[in-house]
Amino acid sequence: MERKNAWKTYTDQDKESLEELCEDYKEFLSECKTERLATKRAIEMAQDAGYASLKEAIAAGRTLKPGDKVWIDNYGKAVMLVQIGTNDIVAGVNILGAHIDSPRLDLKQNPLYEASDFVLLDTHYYGGIKNYQWVALPLALKGVVAKKDGTVLDISLGDDPADPVFCVTDLLPHLGAEQMKKNGREVVEGESLDVLFGSEPLIIEDTEEASESKSAKKEQTYEEQITSTAQKEAVRAHIMQLLLERFGIEEEDFLSAEIEVVPAGDARDCGLDRSMVIGYGQDDRVCAYTSLVAQLAVESPARTAVCILVDKEEIGSVGATGMTSAFFENTMAEILNLMGQQSNLALRRCLANSSMLSSDVSAAFDPSYASVFEPKNSAYCGRGLVFNKYTGSGGKSGSNDANAEYMAALRKIMDDTGVKYQTAELGRVNAGGGGTIAYIPAKYGMNVIDSGVAVLSMHSPWEVTSKADIYEAYKGYKAFLNA
Ligand code: MN
Ligand code: MN
């Protein structure tokens, strides 16, 4: 049962559409490296496509009718788009779900320290990373600093060509003999993933005045604190001064900050034939973006079309912004309420009658690491949208094993609309495994299956996908919403 390489079927028109989609996708990847940035962009795109704020509709008590389009965000880190269909909503909706968080390094709450005339930022990694992949490459800082006065400052450093970049250092091979004997997990320890942030000391000209203010013992201003810090840790004092001048941030403001350390630089074409995309965070923004664009492209669906992009998948879908939160269910209840369906039973029926593509990336077969794959049941770059009937590890454990009947219905949708697709599981039996958000909405009794795009070097700083798969994913998601 070989699946055909999608490229072999493309007309010039296909290639043109594929390129157009992938140009926009690369721009999205480059600009939206965090869940917050992806949410913000999704809202902008939704508004441009005529989506209105659900929160405003709720406040105004507006009724929703077929054709209406609404968006709602969840703490700016997750977002849901709904286009009301012509069918009775209690008969179910079609849902595209994907996640917009990606593995990275997060700054600790107290990150700043000086050591040997360097200032470093201490981090705690987020999601499943190979520590050794995050050293010796240019890094950017993205996130927010929430101040006590309620203002929230956006931080973005390292992607603008005028910006400096940052890095985690590695040991030179000349002195790496002991390091190279360690197993992969320990080559670079998690606690050693500290970001190099500065090295120039602050020179205080009037030291007399500085020591005077120190001895005065009254409440110091922040500027005075910088001056007194400069006595012992002049590099740290300099960084404190720069943070204050450039961003208005005091050191204590890191206590209420969320700053993510991500690879610096744009997503780019990969390969002499430009057939692939290399970029950070394609797990799972490749599925998030194609789902979002499919949702926006759908014209007048029979079944209500829903696209939900969530946070925290990489750490277990937990928290208020992860898939396990009540955000999805609450939003569906609000939608039904605005359509005159106030009963709890109507909501239960709607959810149970719904269908979902839980869209997340698949491990692409990699000839360099062929031994962990089972060739007949692997996802291949270029062979189209991947359906994973089940995921999990150690005997499908933790997996949402989709129903055969549902898979049959999807085969029909894909074949009828000419979408190239393949089926796969994540590696050989007992080679490892992984999970997605699929099992969470499945608890409502709806049909859910994992689907997505195959990725090489998954969870590394620079992941690779095939443009053909991005294109087929978009087509597949649109076909699903229209079915
Ligand atoms: Mn994922
Ligand atoms: Mn992942």
Image: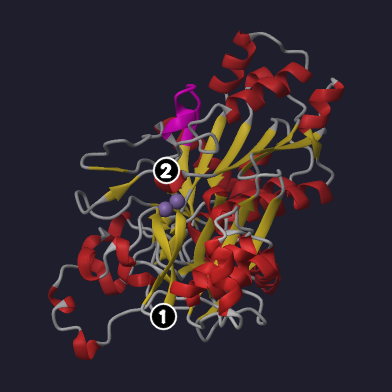
Give me the residue at 42% from left, 78% from top.
Answer: 118
Q: Secondary structure at mark 2?
A: loop
Tell which of 193 and 348 is nearer to you: 193
Asked if the residue at label 2 sits under 8 Å from ligand 1, the reply is yes
* Quadrant occupied by the C terminus: top right
Q: Is residue 82 above or below residue 375?
A: above
Q: CA distance from mark 2 to mark 1?
A: 44 Å
Question: Residue 436 bears which disc, if any?
Answer: 2
Tell which of 137 and 85 is nearer to you: 137
Q: Secondary structure at mark 1?
A: loop
- Image coords of residue 344 (percent x, y): 61, 10
Q: Is residue 32 above or below residue 396?
A: below
Q: Residue at the bottom extreme?
A: 174
Q: Amino acid at mark 1?
A: Asp
Q: Earlier in the sequence, mark 2 or mark 1?
A: 1
Mark 2 crowdedness (10 Å alpha carbons): few <14, some 14-19, many ≥20 = many
Give me the residue at 82% from left, 24% from top.
Answer: 59
* Quadrant occupied by the N terminus: bottom left
| Residue, disc 1 | 117
Q: Amino acid at mark 2?
A: Thr
Give me the residue at 49% from left, 76% from top.
Answer: 234
Quarter of the image for residue 266 reads bottom right
